[in-house]
Amino acid sequence: ASEGPMKGIMGYTEDPVVSTDFVSDPRSAIFDATAGMALDNNFMKVIGWYDNEYGYSCRVLDLVQHVGEVSGIIKA
């Protein structure tokens, strides 16, 4: 997803990271492949990192642009 249609919104990392690595990151979430764990045969714990304020603000701007394009106020 991080390289397909969700590029720039979802991310993926296998690097050793901490929360400060994602300050001002515009993506909504970055999947941490090394932090997840299998809790049993049917249940997986998935970890995603994000900068709550910055990532949310970027999605609000995406929404404003989309509404402007759909309403004809902004040319696509």
Image (cartoon, rainbow, N blue to C red):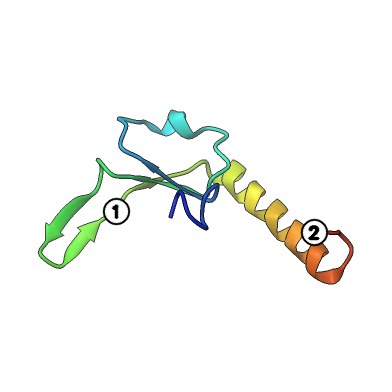
Q: Earlier in the sequence, mark 1 or mark 2?
A: 1
Task: Count residues near mark 1 (Cα–Cα under 10 Å), then give few for <14, some for 14-19, many for 20+.
Answer: few
Indicate the quadrant where residue 65 lies: bottom right
* Residue at 30% over, 37% down: 14
Task: Count residues near mark 2 (Cα–Cα under 10 Å), then give few for <14, some for 14-19, many for 20+.
Answer: few
Residue that badge 1 annotates? 46
Quadrant of the snapshot with the N terminus: bottom left
Residue that badge 2 annotates? 76
Q: Secondary structure at mark 2?
A: loop
* Residue at 52% over, 58% down: 5
Residue 52 % position (x, y) = 54, 45
| The one of 64 and 52 positioned closer to us in this rendering | 64
Furthest residue in direction right, as rendered: 73
Residue 30 % position (x, y) = 42, 45
Disc 2 residue type?
Ala
User: Which dot marks residue 31?
Assistant: none
Q: Nearer the viewer, mark 1 or mark 2?
A: 2
- 32 relative to 7 in the view: left or right: left
Vertical relation: 76 (above or below) 12: below
